[in-house]
Image: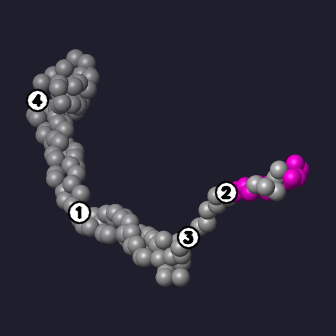
Amino acid sequence: MSDMRKDPDVTIPLAEEHLTVGKRQVETGRVRVRVVTDSDTVHAKASLFDQAVDVKHVPVGREVTEIPAIRQEGDLTIIPVLEEVLVVEKRLVLVEEVHVRRVVSETQVEQPVTVRRQRAEVIRSPAMPNNVPKE
């Protein structure tokens, strides 16, 4: 302190610290993803519909004055069949009717079908020793 009283222009050096923050990439482990496809056999079920017709000839044998039209009674279609008969005069005789009925049947079927599903397997492995950060 005695030197300061003698020289009023004495300088005192000041120090200052600066902080720098940074980051670096360090491998801490690895991940491997593998997609696996599994196959299963399942039974696909469905209903199948078939249509068939039941044809029946129904004898009628009566005279008619005009040609009857094809008619529908519910699920039954009636188709007239005519014949001309020669007598002294010509007359229409309804010989028969053909009755056609639709018959629906249902059949259950089962068919093996292969379906596929994928799943991911994840396998982790630790970092290599030379990639671990040093302190």
What stretch of residues is rendered in magenta? 6-18
- Mark 2 to mark 4 CA distance (whole Å): 116 Å
Amino acid type at circle 1 is Val
Q: Residues within 10 Å of mark 2 (few under 14, many from 20)?
A: few
User: What secondary structure is found at the residue carrying circle 3?
Assistant: loop
- Between residues 66 and 121, which one lies in front from this camera angle? 121
107 or 68: which is nearer to us? Answer: 107
Instruction: Kindly identify which residue carries mark 3.
Output: 26
In-image side of 26 versus 16 (left or right): left
Question: Whole-Å distance between the Cαs marked 3 and 4?
Answer: 101 Å
Q: Nearer the viewer, residue 2 or 74?
A: 2
Q: Counting residues from the N terminus, which is met first, the one under dot 4 or under dot 1?
A: 1
Residue placed under numbered mark 2 in the picture? 19
Mark 3 or mark 2: which comes first in sequence?
2
Q: Above or below — where is 103 with respect to 41?
A: above
Rounded to the nearest angstrom, the CA distance separating label 3 from label 1 is 48 Å
